[in-house]
Image (cartoon, rainbow, N blue to C red):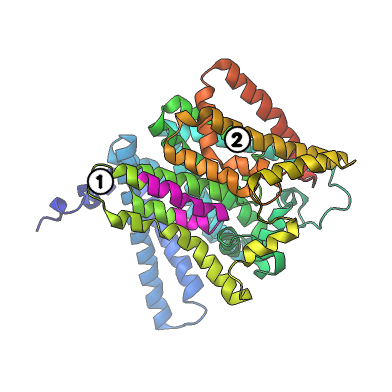
Amino acid sequence: MNLSHVLPSRLFRFSELLFAGWAPLLAVVASGCTLGFFAWYAVIVPGHHGLLSEASLILMTAGGAAAVTALWLTYASYFSARARIALVRALQYDAATWPPLLLLWLSFLLPPQLTHGARLFLVAVLLCCVGKVLIAARFNQTVREVLIDFGATRVAIIVIAELAAVIIGQRAGSHVQESSHALLAVWGRWDAVHYLNIATAGYQGTDMAFFPLYPLLIRMVGALAGNHLVAGLLISSASLFFGLLYLYKLLEHEYDRAVARRAIFYVSIFPTAVYFTAVYTESLFFMLTVASFYYMRARLWWVAAIVGFFAALTRIEGVLLIVPFVMECFAAQRGQRRNYADYAAGLLIPAGLAVYMGYLWVLRADPLYFSHVQIHWNRHFAPPWVSLINAFGKIAHTSSAQIVANQSLEIAFTLLMIGVLVAGWHSLRPSYIAYMGLSILVPMSTSNLMSMPRFALVLFPMFAILARWGERPWVNNVILAFSLPLLGLFTVLFADWYWVA
């Protein structure tokens, strides 16, 4: 049988590896051998000796070379198709991203404290990924524009936050630093302390108000990085980049490239965008919700549902994705015979919440403990208008300037979300309207408006509306004049341990 007629022919064009040149091939094979050797060194050496160890060394080293070479060919085949360049050229470009794995040999030269927790492996993998992103940006306009927005805004926020922490200093009487390194500790403020505690010691007390996926990822990556705070920063940064990429592709499909470009920029400079960089769930939740919508629109129902499952494991609002899922599924099958298997896939979304509820039932005999513990933050169920009434009441009955400022911000951002939805709903798909409306109503139904400016950050339909309006130069200028100064102010306040959202 001619396998080239059964499977994609590119996967069997191993002759292309030779045409790519000996230098790229040797670089990839050497990187694969390195990966295989260190896998053997970490797994086999501690428990086996003699002939078994020597045989496994040969097998694992050769296996590493074969695996990396296969990945190289597979990814280059995909990249050549997307970038519309010859496979040989794609192989040559991608070969340059694998040599960072050779850094693993430094573990025999550097002091043990520098390589603790597989740090070198994590650094090598990160460098490989960064190389692939940079090469993708060279050929793909979408990746290039997302990377520019991501890089420019994150660098600016990091510089402002670090300068604020060093020059102004931490507010007296605030919490204990989570890191001995002051520059890193800037990103471990407020709720970040809870996520880091969960990742380090598991769930305790009020920590159970915070859903498990983000701290679980911190724990896993932290095992490699040797530092949970660094792990959280890596997860947040990577999630934001891919979240912006998904948003660009989604809105480019819904509208056009200009709207998509403005939307990712408005998200990146939103006043509370500092939380995208910090050890908070905002980046991860943003990526998962936008990705779920992207796959809904692509009619990949099971993929959308799986992503929605993880969104519901990240924050309670993730379960709301079931509503747009059903709406999009219904719209896709209008006038056709119903495929109920597609609808059934949507059950995975609330299953994310069910998993955490099951865990709490085992741990505390109360599956709704995550909700009951909210009373610690003076939150309980109430009609949505009650939270607005309470916020105005706090302003009227306090002499504290800080309380007035906080409540005013929460009211302003809540009214902003409602106003944008009311004024711009006609430019959104029904599923987007439903998701945005529910995402506003749920946090408003907790008797106070705490964190509403931060919750607005992940409402991507709002940025789609703003991006449509931003076609007018004066509207674009108003958005920039509103966002940029407040982003700088909120970043300084966050870095100095003042409550923002």
The structure residue drawn at horizontal position 69% and vertical position 63%, both measured from the top left corner, is 373
Specify the amino acid type for callout 1: Glu
The label number, if any, that marks residue 16 in the structure image: 1
Q: Is residue 435 above or below residue 156?
A: below
Q: Furthest residue to the left?
A: 1
The numbered mark, 1 or 2, whose residue comes first in the sequence reads 1
Quadrant of the rendering where the C terminus is positioned: top right
Q: Tell me if 298 is positioned left or right of 365 in this view.
A: left
Q: Position of residue 436 (x, y in %)?
A: 53, 41
Q: Picture coordinates of residue 458 (x, y %)?
A: 57, 43
| Mark 2 neighbour class, 10 Å CA radius: few under 14, some 14 to 19, many 20 or more | some
Q: Residue at x 59, y 45 (%)?
A: 441
Q: For mark 2, what is the residue? A: 418
Mark 1 → mark 2, Cα distance in angstroms = 56 Å
Numbered disc 2: secondary structure: helix
Magenta part of the protein: which range?
Answer: 308-328
